Structures are given as C-alpha cells and as structure tokens.
Amino acid sequence: MEIGSKIRAIRNRKKITIAQMCEDTGLSKGFISNVENNNTSPSINTLQTISTFLGVPLPYLLLEKQQHMRVVRKAERTYSTFNNLKIEHLTSKGGLRMMLVEFPPGTSMGEANAHEGEECHLVLEGKVLAEQGEDSMIIEEGDSFSWNASVPHFVKNIGDGKATVLISVYSDTELNDVF
C-alpha cells in the first residue's frame, strides 16, 4: 500500500506544509517525511490523527488504487443488444452492475429467466409489464420495482412508445449472462 504517497498528494492538493501538519498533529517532520515516502508504516491511531487533520475519512487512506472512485464518461460507455433491446452499460463495481435498457414498443427481454442476485429497476420512460413468479404489475414512468433474480422474471414494453429502464443488478459473483 502506498498510504504515504496518498497523504502527500492530499496535503499538497490542500496546500498544507509539513510544518503546519507537524504543528497540528504533534508528529515530527522526519516521521511525516518517512510516512510520505512510504519508508514507515504508521499505526492506525497515527493514521486517524493524520486523516482527521487532512479532513478525509480514515478508510479512504486505506483504499488500494483500484478501489477508488471509477468514472465512466458518457462517450466511453459500451453498448450491446439482446432481443432487439439496446443495453447501455453504465458502470460496474464488484458484483454490482448498472445498465440503461431501451425496449422498443412490444419488445421484451425474451423468455422469463432466473439468475443469481438481486435487481432494482426504475422506469425512466414508457410503460412496462413486470412479472415474477405469480406476480404481474404494470409499471409506468417514475415507478420502480425490485426482485430476487433467482425467481424467473420477465419485463415487456406494453406502451405505444419506447420504454427506458435503469437496471441495477447485484450478485456475489460476477454475472456475464445478464443481457
């Protein structure tokens, strides 16, 4: 872990000198320098003092680079198609995926299917029929629904225009077969 490099970057971004940091934390200049150069590993208590001084949460200092915020710019999003549906892959983190799915009039996701995980949906535009097991509901713009994806489920556009649905899928394992 390169906690020290992260501490230095935050301190520099906030235009804080090592002298100011020493004065407010009670840590020596040599110790702070060793920490920032990754030559020593501070205790959790010392990291808490530093994080409080810098105004950042302690867990942020402990994150690995790949755990930091990930941004996917609109122009960088990937798309796929499935049963005449347009799927825009917005972002993912671990077992969580977020997609924007366009259903042309009359289209559906195909046969009812089941897979591991949980799903949450927000209808941004249009009207859809959502079915899971024996439950069947008409969901309209602004409405949301969720379900355990291990029970067979089905979504179909029943409106006159396209339907756009924001879908978040979570699973303990990475899913490659959902859309």
Image: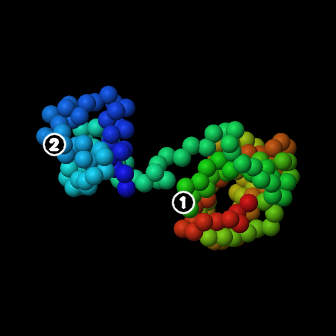
Where is residue 87? Give x, y as percent.
75, 51
Residue lying at 55% horizontally and 55% vertically, measured from the top left: 93
145 relative position to 179: left or right: left
- Three-letter amino acid code of the residue under disc 2: Leu
Q: Which of marks 1 and 2 is nearer the N terminus?
A: 2
3 w.r.t. 131: above or below = above
Residue position marked by numbered label 1 in the rendering: 94
Residue lying at 80% horizontally and 67% vertically, measured from the top left: 111
Please count the marks in the image.
Answer: 2
Residue position marked by numbered label 2 in the rendering: 27
- Tell me the CA gap for discs 1 and 2: 37 Å
Q: How dense is the environment of label 1, judged by Cα within 10 Å: few (below 14), some, or many (20 and up)?
A: few
Q: How dense is the environment of label 2, judged by Cα within 10 Å: few (below 14), some, or many (20 and up)?
A: some
- The answer to whether residue 133 of the structure is visible from this angle is no
Give the image quarter of residue 112.
bottom right
Where is residue 128? Give x, y as percent.
75, 51
- The answer to whether residue 12 of the structure is visible from this angle is yes
Residue lying at 64% horizontally and 65% vertically, measured from the top left: 175
Where is residue 49? Give x, y as percent.
21, 45
71 relative position to 100: left or right: left
